[in-house]
Each structure stands twice: as structure tokens, then as C-alpha cells.
Amino acid sequence: MRNIQVKVFPSASKLKKKQQLAWKIAEIASDRAHLNEDAVDMVINRIIDNASVAIASFSRKPVISAREMALAHPKKNGATIFGINSKKKFDCEWAAWANGTAVRELDFHDTFLAADYSHPGDNIPPILAVAQQKKMSGKDLIKGILTGYEVQVNLVKGICLHEHKIDHIAHLGPSVAAGLGSLLKLNTDKIYQSIQQSLHITVSTRQSRKGEISSWKAFAPAHAGKLAIEAVDRCMRGEGAPSPIYEGEDSVIAYVLSGPKARYTVPLPNINEEKKAILETYTKEHSAEYQSQALIDLAINMNDRIENISKIKSVEIHTSHHTHYVIGTGAKDPQKMDPNASRETLDHSIMYIFAVALEDGKWHHVNSYTTKRANKKSTVELWKKIKTFEDKKWTKNYHDPDPNKKCFGGRVIIKMKDGKKIVDEISVADAHPAGKRPFERSNYIEKFQTLTDGLISTKEAKRFLNAVQNLRKLKSGELTKLNVEVKAKSLRTRSKKTIF
């Protein structure tokens, strides 16, 4: 690996292309690195994971809306849409839009946390859609996805967007563009221009994840992927981009992030070095914000030690800066304490999540979020007793550069009305690579079977799982096998008179 130093330069300095971050990213996207077999296996796991959560969210309103927009854009030799018959094809950017929304809706796919946040699995829908439309092979798709993960993970390590209230999709646009460059075997200059365009058009604020969180949280990554596809298409036609997009005098760093005097360090592999960043990412066992995963496991574990929930006086969660300020009481969002808040808001409230997991001793991607469940009297009472606190120890561990030491948990102190204290802590989720039960291929398959049960046939499940596990050998034109068709009775519409 190499550390790329990034800072702002005045326009008069005429910073050369090869000194720019976007060019250095483009270089690894256009290189000829060998495939790491462990990384390839993880690509397969994450395609299974994405299909699982996409089908599970098939009948949810945002997913239906995105899908119906996409269905209005058929294309004879296009891409497939999750749930729809694979013989039907659609414009790849619209397929990416529909599939990306379906993957993101339940907040149930993979994550990587460092200086900033990310869901690297968001790279897969746009890269897969273009791969299907351009009739690429399984090996081409693998290379594209590995590049997408490599770029997003390393941007997340080096550049914090959250401190400036910029949404994390600003790293997704460039990573998708880079991944598409690898997939399509574009030259370095076209990828360089595509990365710059994609960053320029995917900068947005984090209000989408603040206050009353709406369905846009699910649409946002899909939108970034769609915009990146369009940016790459323009650059393939010879168009250029605002440049230098990171280092320029009026660039993203200069006026959106830390300013003209800022210094960032972005790690990147050497040219032709294996891309393995996907191995540093982790999926979710529970449908909720990743920073709650370990605390859900802890709450379930602590359930056995509490005979009567009503006897709890208070609950303190001592955790990292990010957890406290994003999903904890440090966010100062009254919506996070509202039983009638949206599902999107509740899955960003560790107070709600911990209360339900502690009371129920389990977690479910649907039942744990119903309005009836959120309004349960005992839950609301417990919910109001929970407060979070930043602990410098946990913040330091959260940012540890060693992936084997980085952790996202916390220490919980439950004070009972009789004066008794129940104290426990957890470093990482049970399903984390360093957890009690690290996710392996069998776990991804089990998750797929659980989330798609009743929605797809046993035959369709078996067909898909066989195809995806044979990804390396899929030939040109065979990537439509990675689509999953739902049973006819599961197909719902909410058609209204709209533009499309």
C-alpha cells in the first residue's frame, strides 16, 4: 500500500494529472492486478447478501416506487431488475436505481467504518447492471466490484465527510465510477474524468440521515450509482470533468470539506497490487445501523439477567463518538425518542434498538420496527431511561487503523431500582470477522434463505445460489443468472399518474 497526500493547490500551480488523487485512483482501476481468491469468495458472499435484502424489501413502498420508475425504461439488451422475470430488460442506469434502492432499504447489507461511514455493497447494483447490459463475464464483474470496494474503503479511511455534514455517498460516486472503469477496461484518463464527474455530482448533505429520516435514505446510494453510470457514459464519449476535483482552488476539499489548508492521507494499493479491501468490510446479522449491531447482541445476551424490565431505573451506554452523536442521545434528535417515528429513524436510534432487543431478547427485520411494537408501553418507558455517553477509549478503538483491533461496541450499565447494577461490554458484533460467530458462506446462504422464504420458489433459490457460486466461470451474457425472480403473488404495484 502507499499513502497518497492530498491538499489544495492554487489554480496558478497547474497541478499535473498524475499528481492528483483522482488520477491515482484511476491508475489502480485500470491496472492488471491479479485476483485474490479470498477477495473473490467475498464478492460472491456479498452478491448473495445483496440479493437477500433486496428480495426481502421487495414489497416496501420505496422499493416499489423505484422499481416502477425503472419499469418505465425497458431496453431490449439491458439489465435485469430484482424480482422481475429475467427475460425482461431495462436501461442499466434505471435497473441500478431500482436494485440499489432495494438493497439499501432495510439497512441490512455490508458496512465499513473508519474516518467516515460506508455501505460498500452499494457499489454492486450499478456495476452489475452495466455488466449485464454490456454482456461482460463473471470475471469482469469480479474485477469491477473489487475496485469499487477498494476505492470506497480507502476513501473512507482517509477523508471524513461526516464532520462537515456531507453524506457518505460522496465517496460512493467515485468508487462506482472506478469500478465501472475496471469492468469496462477503460483507459486511465477516461476513468480519471469519470471519477471527477461522479464526485462533483454526488455531494449532498447528511440531512438525509438527520432528524426525521425519510425514504430518501434508501434512494440516495442508488441515485449516486445511477449518476456515476451516466458520468462514465459521458466520459466514454470524450467529455471531461471539473478538475482537479479534490485539490482545486474551489474544489470539494477547499469549500465543502476542511478547507484550503487541509491535509488528507488516502491509502491506496500500488499499481498491480491485489485489491483486498473487501476483506476488511463486514455484513449485518441484524437489520439496523451497523453501530448498533454489537449492542443488539449485547442486549440479547443481557436479557437473561433481567427478571423484570420495569425494575430498571436507568441504562447507560458508554460508546464511541460516532455512535453517541449519530444514533445516540448526542444527536439531540427528538425523533429518535418518538414511538411514531419512521422506520428509517428508528433504525438510527440506539435507544429504541437497545430497548427492544433487551426486552425481547431477539431482533427481527420487520417485527422489531412495527408501529405497534414501537408504541408498546413498557418499551416506551424503558426507551426513555436510556442515555448514551462518549467514552474516549471506545472512540480510540473505533478509529484503530488495525482492522483486527478496530471495534464498534460499548459498555452498558443497567441500574436497577433496588440499587443493583448489571454491567457488560462488547467490542464487535458476533457476526463480525473478529466476533463470536464470524459470517461464512453458510451464514450468507442461511440469511438468503431466511429473507427470501415464501417470496421465491425453492427451485429459484437453488438456481441462483448455484449460479452465483459459479461466478468465476460465468461467460459473456450469462450475468442475468444473478437476478432473482419472485413468485407472481409477491409482485405488487402502486401505480399512480406520474411523469414516467
Image (cartoon, rainbow, N blue to C red):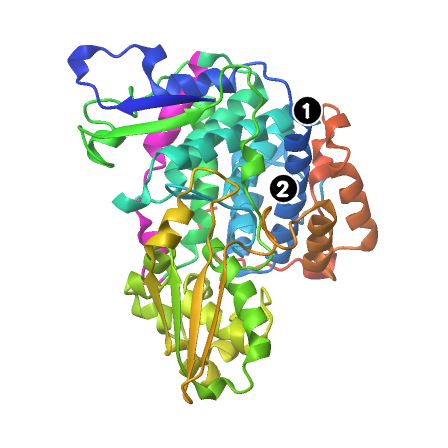
Q: Which mark is residue 446?
A: none
Residue 385 found in image quarter? bottom left
Residue at 70% of width from left, 51% of height from top? 443
Residue 351 position in % (x across, y down): 41, 69
* Nearest to the observer: residue 407 or residue 29: 407
Mark 1 residue element: helix
Residue 337 position in % (x across, y down): 36, 73
Looking at this view, name the residue that lies furthest to the front: 420
Q: Quick check: is 192 in the magenta stretch?
A: yes
Spatial CA span between label 1 and label 2: 15 Å
Q: Amino acid at mark 2?
A: Arg
* Residue at which label 2 appears: 46
Residue at 56% of width from left, 45% of height from top? 282
Q: Looking at the image, is 177 positioned above or below residue 16?
A: below
Q: State whether residue 46 appears in this view.
A: yes
Q: Looking at the image, is 17 positioned above or below residue 281?
A: above
Main secondary structure type of the part rendered in magenta = helix
Span of residues in magenta: 189-212
Q: Quick check: is 179 in the magenta stretch?
A: no
* Residue at which label 1 appears: 139
Q: State whether residue 370 appears in this view.
A: no
